[in-house]
Every structure is written in C-alpha cells, then in structure tokens.
Image (tube, rainbow, N blue to C red):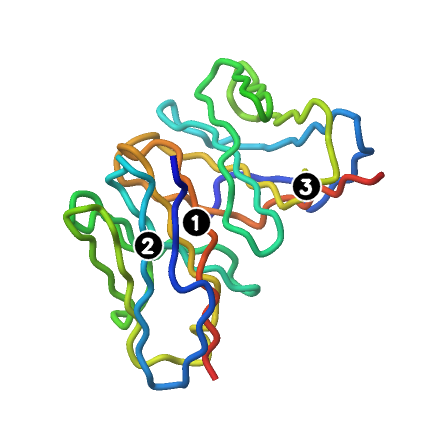
Amino acid sequence: KAGVTQTPRYLIKTRGQQVTLSCSPISGHRSVSWYQQTPGQGLQFLFEYFSETQRNKGNFPGRFSGRQFSNSRSEMNVSTLELGDSALYLCASSWMGQEEYFGPGTRLTVT
Amino acid sequence: DAKTTQPTSMDCAEGRAANLPCNHSTISGNEYVYWYRQIHSQGPQYIIHGLKNNETNEMASLIITEDRKSSTLILPHATLRDTAVYYCIVRVAGGSEKLVFGKGMKLTVNP
C-alpha cells in the first residue's frame, strides 16, 4: 500500500497570505489528523476528520481550518499567515482510530 | 499535557539491544501505550502499541509492567538508522482521541 502523501513538500509564503495544504491518506483509512511541529512547541494536534466530519479540534485559532472529502483526502487551510505559523505540518491517517501513520510533512516558511 | 515521562536522551552501541523506558503512572484502564519515533525532519513513524500484555512485532518489543505504570520499548539489535527521537504516548485506542506528544527521548546509536 502507498503511504500517506502530502503536497506540497515545501512552501514559502508571505505574512498575510493564505495557504492550503493537501493530504492523501492510506487507501482504506477514513480518519485523517493534522499536527503542527515547531522547535518551540513540539508536535501539537490541530484537528481530526472522520467521514468528512471534524471529530476533534486542538487549541488553535480559527485561522486554521480543514476539511475532508468523500474520498478521505483532506486539506487544511491557514489564513492571514503569521511568522509564527512557520512549521512542519504533518498529516496522519488511521483506520478506525487505531495506530496513526504519518506523511512526510509540508515545511511551511512564512516571511 | 503528556501523560508520560521519558529520559531526555540515551546512547546505545550499534548491534546491542536498546531499552527505552517510559513512566505512565496515571494511565487509565482503557488507555494503551503507544510508541512512535521521528527521524530528523521526517514524519513520526508508528512502532508498536499495547494494553497490558507484552507485544512484539518486526520492529520492536514492548514490555508493560503488571501494574501498567511503566513500560520499556526494546530494539533488539540497534542500528545507526535507529537514531531518532522516541515518543511514548498513552491514549484510548479507537475513537477520536488525539495523540499528545511530549518531548520524547533522543536515542543515539553509536558505531
């Protein structure tokens, strides 16, 4: 089976812009979670989707949003980018909430 | 907050067994112990998980104490490629509970 894929792998944006990141889960996995990793805060949970519904949400501002499509693919969007949003954004998929398998991440740099 | 405590770092000689400890004294009866690792700048990799019985797979063994307050991840023959940050996490399996990553433990395998 192919693993979790994320696009793009690297991205440079300017403050105030918005960005959309994409995640394709492992075939058959219906749960997709997003995490942010920064040197200062470590790995932090953003949100989780299952069957197109958000089931859980972390403590992030409303500028961070996501969605899941009927084929389980997911996108996350960050609006009005701030310098502090520079991070590695990781997507993970699982079957029915068991062990999660992570993608390689999208490295976002905000200048 | 993470519910586990791990040493900050550990060294191991290549070819020897690496025993990675984790304390989770407040673990609940329905919480599993999960282990992930993250090699520099890659997405975390699932290793193994267990409830109360010892578990083994092709990557590692997980030994959980009878009172379930601590566990040990064993890499039987460590290689240089096992150098990574290892995370011990407790969570309820299934459902929407997120993974809460602490600071993890840096394992360095030396030649």
Q: Quadrant of residue A15?
A: bottom left
Query: Which residue occupies the foreground of this view, B65 or A101?
Result: A101
Q: Three-letter amino acid code at disc 3?
A: Pro
**Of marks 1 and 2, which one's residue comes earlier in the chain?**
2
Q: Residues within 10 Å of mark 1 (few under 14, many from 20)?
A: many
What residue is shown at x 52% (from left), y 17% (from top)? B55
Dot 2 and dot 3 residues touching (CB under 8 Å): no
Q: Quadrant of residue B83?
A: top right
Q: Quadrant of residue B74?
A: top right
Q: Residues within 10 Å of mark 2 (few under 14, many from 20)?
A: many
Determine the chain carrying the residue at label 1: A
Residue, disc 3: B7
Determine the chain carrying the residue at label 3: B
Quadrant location of the C terminus of chain B in the rendered image = top right
Dot 1 and dot 2 residues touching (CB under 8 Å): yes
In percent of width and height, residue A51 lies at: 16, 43
Q: Three-letter amino acid code at disc 1?
A: Gly
* Mark count: 3
Element on which disc 2 rests: strand
Query: Which residue occupies the foreground of this view, A86 or B111?
Result: B111
Element on which disc 3 rests: loop
In percent of width and height, residue B37 lies at: 57, 41
Residue, disc 1: A103
In percent of width and height, residue B75 lies at: 67, 27
Q: Residues within 10 Å of mark 3 (few under 14, many from 20)?
A: some
Please tell me the numbered disc located at residue A23: 2
What residue is shown at x 47% (from left), y 26% (from top)? B49
